[in-house]
Amino acid sequence: MIVEMRNDADDRDVEEVCAALRAVGGTPRLIRWAAAQRLVVSADLKCAPGGLTDRAGVRRVVQPSGDFCLTSREFHSAGTVVEVGGIGIGGSEFVVIAGPCAVESAEQLREISDAVTEAGAVILRGGAFKPRTSPYSFQGLGMKGLRLLDRRRRQTGLPVVTEVMQPEQVELVAASSDVLQIGTRNMQNFPLLKEVGRSRRPVLLKRGMCATVKEWLLAAEYVMAEGNPHIVLCERGIRTFETASRFTLDLTAVPIVRRHSHLPVLIDPSHATGHAYLVGPMTLAAAAAGADGVMIDVHTDRAAARCDGSQALRPAEFKALVADLERLLSGFDRKLARNPDGPGAAGSLVPGRAVQPPTRSAARW
Ligand code: PEP
Ligand code: MN
């Protein structure tokens, strides 16, 4: 159960709500939410104690019917728009994020960021800390890569998304980037989820390659339960018996997530498929399925890329794909997000696209 307190509720109002929940066996948890709002969550209580809604300082009581609390569409029926540098992820516009899998040098980052921006990308991706399957593979430039990303975002004004792998590095990565990426291998790294939850930076939470949608949304719940509501989900393929592609892109995740949760959802067709020739078709399919955007690997010299070259598009291929995407989106009355005129405040929560709210039974898992 979620008890949303009014902004003018005082500490005594909050304590009295907590006491009322404890009295019926609940374990209330106070969450400091965006815009000075406070929530009291007691996920173990399925029934509100009598008179709770009439208590001083209480705005409303929400009783989600499934396993999700703060991620549930029953809590926030309009979709969430996560704002990143003035670009809304989750609104009516489709957001294209692109860049190299890994930052390799200042020159490489400059060339690729110029090419992807010119083609229509509005957020730059690039890994500094790379979670590689083999310890002998390129591990990323680390701190040097982070400094290169930070310098590029300051030079161009382009927001940057980059992966953070350790709780101790969250503050540092948050100071040098605009979005904290949690990779597939860390989707259930709970100390890391809690630490990004304590940050105010938007979080791009990739789906674990062996995680169900329910486990993925519960991972998002960990971040939100620490008070950070600015989460963007990213489907990046799951492990199946199929070997023709690197993973199997689960496009059903898009409408499933949108039905149960108010959080925006992106697709990463590059890591999902592992092959450049599959990136275009899966990008278009993601847009048709209702995704809020895509994140695509682009490299100017695929053969020389130090990480995941086989799945990277060349700048010209990327540009042609963005043009196709724009044509497809127009059929759905949607547009590509464009660079905003001015910088916006990162991370504000505003109403998003309308979606059929789930029926109570549909929200059960
Ligand atoms: C990435 O986007 O750089 C990455 C490593 O992705 P994933 O965690 O999905 O493998
Ligand atoms: Mn990669």
Image (cartoon, grey):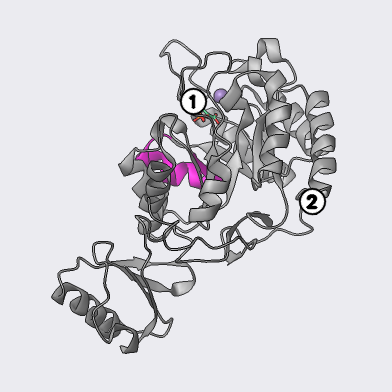
Q: Which residue is rendered at x = 27% and y = 76% of the image?
A: 48
Query: What percent of the width, then of the height, locates residue 54?
Result: 33, 89
Q: Nearer the viewer, mark 2 or mark 1?
A: 2
Say which residue label 1 marks. Answer: 130
Quadrant where the N terminus lies?
bottom left
Q: Which mark is residue 198?
A: none
Q: Which residue is rendered at x = 68% and y = 22% of the image?
A: 278
Q: Amino acid at mark 1?
A: Lys
Magenta stretch: give its range.
165-181
Does 81 appear in magenta? no
Please tell me how crowded label 2 is: few (under 14), some (14-19), or many (20+) other residues with Cα within 10 Å: some
> At numbered mark 2, what does the secondary structure look like: helix, strand or loop?
loop
Work out whether residue 358 can be spotted.
yes
Q: Is residue 104 above or below residue 168?
A: above
Q: Which mark is residue 335?
A: 2
Q: Is residue 51 above or below residue 326?
A: below
Q: Is residue 310 left or right of residue 166?
A: right
Q: How many marks?
A: 2
Which quarter of the picture shows residue 135?
top left
Q: Amino acid at mark 2?
A: Lys
Q: Is mark 1 within 8 Å of ligand 1?
A: yes
